[in-house]
Structures are given as C-alpha cells and as structure tokens.
Amino acid sequence: MKIGDLVRRVRNPKHIHLDMNAEDNIGVVVKLNTGVFEDQVKVKWTKPTWYDPEDGLSAEYAENLEVIGEGNYLERQGNAE
C-alpha cells in the first residue's frame, strides 16, 4: 500500500468498524505510518464514518483495507501534499 492508492474496507476486518456502507465507500491513502505505533494509514473517504477534525482524514489499519486502484491518484488529480 502506498500514498495515492484507492482503497475500500474489507468485509470482515479484524478491527470492527461501524460503517454499514463499506462496500461503496472509496478512499485514497494520503499518509503512511501514522498512529501511536505507526501501524495505521490516513485515508480520505468519499463518505467518512468518522474523521480527525484536525486534518479531515480517517486513521485506518492497512490490514482492513483492500487496494482497488494502484498508482498515485493524488498526483494525477493535482492534489499532492
């Protein structure tokens, strides 16, 4: 998984999410190695269930995400940080 990959949540994640619309919710990975133990990624979702009010991104465990589009989506859209 890398910055710019398009992702969605897997059906049976180890860490339970309350997102009932997980299958049609698509996000883009914008940060890697986040969280207290640096074991999370930050995702910008089309329909966020919750997000950090400081940056508008959701912290997710990579094991709960499925890459559905590889490549640097942010650069192609002109939104790279």
Image (cartoon, rainbow, N blue to C red):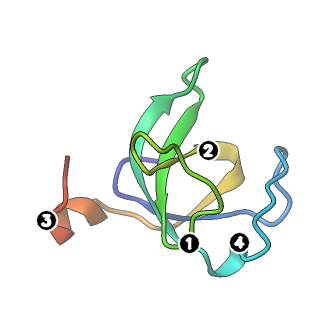
**Disc 2 to disc 3: CB gap under 8 Å:** no
In the figure, 19 relative to 52: above or below? Answer: below
Mark 3, residue position: 78
Is residue 27 shown left or right of residue 17?
left
Question: Looking at the image, is mark 1 or mark 4 earlier in the sequence?
Answer: 4
> Residue sitting at 36 percent across and 48 percent down?
3
Q: Amino acid at mark 1?
A: Lys
Q: Nearer the viewer, residue 17 or 39?
A: 17
Q: Position of residue 11 (x, y in %)?
A: 81, 66
Give the distance between the C-alpha atoms of the residues marked 2 and 3, in whole angstroms.
Answer: 24 Å
Is residue 4 shown left or right of residue 80?
right
> Residue sitting at 61 percent across and 45 percent down?
60
Question: Looking at the image, is mark 2 or mark 3 earlier in the sequence?
Answer: 2
Q: Amino acid at mark 3?
A: Gly
Q: Position of residue 14 (x, y in %)?
A: 85, 45
Q: Amino acid at mark 2?
A: Ala
Mark 1, residue position: 47
Mark 4, residue position: 22
